Image (tube, rainbow, N blue to C red):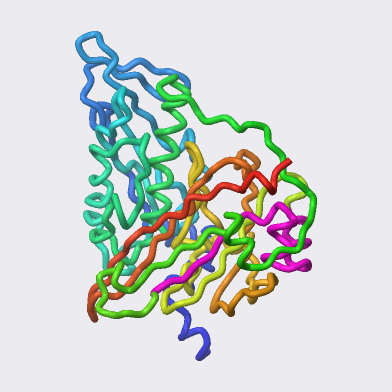
Amino acid sequence: MKKFLLLPILAVIFVLTTEAYGDQWKFFEHRYSYKLEDVLPATKFVQKKGYWEGYKDNKLAGYVVISKDWTGKRVGYSGKHLETLIGFDTNGTITGVKLLFHSEPIVLIGLKEESYLDFIKQYKGKNIKTSISVGKDISMDAITGATVTAVVQNSIILETSRKVADAAGMVTAVKGKGRKISQKFATLTWDELNKSGAVRHLVVASKDLGLESDEVYLDLYAGVINPPSIGRNFAGDSMYNEAMSKIKGGGSAIAIVSKGKGSFKGTGFVRGGIFDRFNIEQGSKVYMLTDKDYRPLSEVSAKGASAFSEGGVFIIRDKDFDPTEPFKLNFILPYRVSVTKKDFKSFTIEYEIPQRFLE
């Protein structure tokens, strides 16, 4: 019983299934009416496959889309999709965003429904062709405490609008070059992995977060471990073999280790085990990672590596993710600015497997 009381109240609630508590779960559901012109100033709309074209004065003004048709598998805290109406003009500038349905239990952490709606309003004026990060471009002040909801909502808005822009011929999706990962192996030291670019390094000082301290908040290293010369040296033979066995049908594996007073993983998992403190961005897609595809990594195998306080190997099962192409690792770091206030700031690692590890 004592262990139960120590669990965060949200974690307790989300182990309850919607099947067993269907009626109670509906308490959190919110659905809103909408018109297409709510998110795009147009006078005529023409339906296409999965989206609408909006016209004003007989000229194409932009596009409107409902997110569930494009990113329905992206789910929030409740395990349900955050249904969103999105409008953007022909330049890619978001003209409006409106929430259509959600069942996020934000009331349990003291947030009002208006707080969520205020959070959504920030996307108007942002351009989908650029990186839009929670904690940097999008403030979490309105919805502090609902990190998973914010990160998933951000993913839904970006991925949905970018996919529609591609489908409409407004942008051209970046296609892979057909490169292959080399299966050759060479023993490399930790220093050699870093100097080659196989492992990328991110240091966040406490001062970077506005904290009055000379301490390092996060000292982090990350790398794709599909190439054996990276994976076996970084994660060790056993972990490398386990990771590769999980992606035989297609997929990728990334290792991340860190030390410092901060954490890139966090300690609380929600339903589905979403890691809300980081995600991967490549092209039009944003990849969320869960605890189902995670294994803890306690140490780095390569000679010369120091000890780390936390680490893990994360599997990306989406076959459309191309590990040989550049991508971004986005980190959202929460930090305490006072006894009553928490803030967030985002940081990015740009990663690409060096040519020497490719065929």
Looking at the image, residue 334 sits to the left or right of residue 350; the answer is left
Of residues 331 and 178, which is closer to you in this image? 178
Residue 13 visible here: no
Task: Residue 234: say if magenta.
Answer: yes
Of residues 40 and 192, which is closer to you in this image? 192
The residue that appears at 55% across and 56% down in the rendered structure is 289
Region of the chain picked out in magenta, as a range: 217-246
Task: Residue 310: say if magenta.
Answer: no
What is the quadrant of residue 198 in the picture?
Answer: bottom right
x, y (%) of residue 206? 33, 74
Looking at the image, residue 93 sits to the left or right of residue 67; the answer is left
Looking at the image, the residue that sits furthest to the bottom is 2
What is the quadrant of residue 111 in the picture?
Answer: bottom left
Residue 239 visible here: yes
The residue that appears at 25% across and 27% down in the rendered structure is 40
The chief SS type of the magenta part is: helix
